[in-house]
Image (tube, helix red, strand yellow):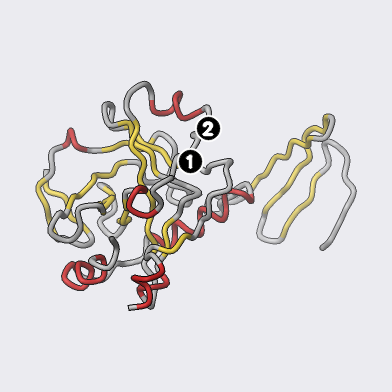
Amino acid sequence: MTLETRDFGPLEIDEKDIVTFQGPIFGFEKYSRFVFLYRQEIHEHFIWLQSVDEPSLCFILVQPQLIVSEYAPTLPPEAKRLLGAGEYMCWLLVSLRQPFSASTVNLKSPIVVNTRTRQAAQFVLEEDWPLRHPLLKEEAAEC
Amino acid sequence: MLILTRKAGESLVLDGGIEVKITEVYGDKVRIGIDAPPDVKVYRKELYATVQENQSAAMTAPAADALKDLLSKVK
């Protein structure tokens, strides 16, 4: 099917690549079908989470290990019920800000995907991870 | 902050057609029912910070070329 995307125009996607949110992206409860768009040429550790049903709705996600190497969230008990058995992958939402050095990532509420079933959810962790952690490491933010 | 005392079964009405009803009190917990128009979203406060953060994450990103340049600083 052809998908209208916010950042990359119309794209051909395979319906079996659609990720279904079993628990909502909070504040966006109406939208449950998304696709991951990989853009290696922009950055290999970022992906775009594009809504299938609303072209203007798209999030940029980053691999946690790029930001905080020791990131090891404890998921709430309902994770297993929502996402089923399988291997989980964790992604962090990026908030791009002006200036770019003020951009942040959300370590408190990761997006978690079961890579086998393609079911996903956002979880708000009990642990004390920050909602706004700098995207850039200090030395990079200065230049 | 306005503080009122209510019993189970009693309600408050907020302007805009929102009713907040104390349905049950047990131990240190209170069950609350909320009747609101469909466009009024209700969140537990600890979730609301995440809602706001998600809204800022959903803002439009720069065009691909500019973004590539910016993200190249993330290593």
Which amino acid, mark 2? Pro
Share a chain, discs 2 and 1? yes
Residues A75 and B26: in front is A75
Percent x, y for residue B58? 37, 60
Picture coordinates of residue A81 (x, y %)? 45, 24
Residue at screen point 37% across, 55% down:
A67
Provide residue A118's location: percent of width, then percent of height.
Answer: 28, 32
Q: Is residue A132 above or below residue A47?
A: below
Residue, far front: A139
Q: Quadrant of the N terminus of chain B?
A: bottom right
Eyeballing the image, is A1 above or below B56? above
Q: Position of residue A53 (x, y in %)?
A: 27, 48
**What residue occupies the far top of the structure in this picture?**
A85
Q: Is residue B60 left or right of residue B10?
A: left
Q: Secondary structure at mark 2?
A: loop
Pinpoint the chain carrying mark 2: A
Q: CA distance from mark 2 to mark 1?
A: 7 Å
Q: Is residue B9 above or below residue B63?
A: above
Give the secondary structure at mark 1.
loop
Name the image quarter holding residue B55.
Answer: bottom left
Q: Which residue, as the protein is rendered here, is positioned at the far left?
A: A12
Question: From what the image shows, is residue B52 above or below residue A17?
Answer: below
Residue type beneath disc 1: Phe
In this rendering, position of residue A70 left or right of residue A10: right
- Residue A123 circle label: 1
* Residue assigned mark 2: A76
Please name whichever residue, A35 or B72, is drawn nearer the observer in this view of the structure: B72
Along the line of sight, the residue nearer the viewer: B9 or B60 = B60
Q: Earlier in the sequence, mark 2 or mark 1?
A: 2
Q: Residue at x 41, y 69 (%)?
A: A138
Callout 2 crowding tier (Cα within 10 Å): few <14, some 14–19, many ≥20 = few
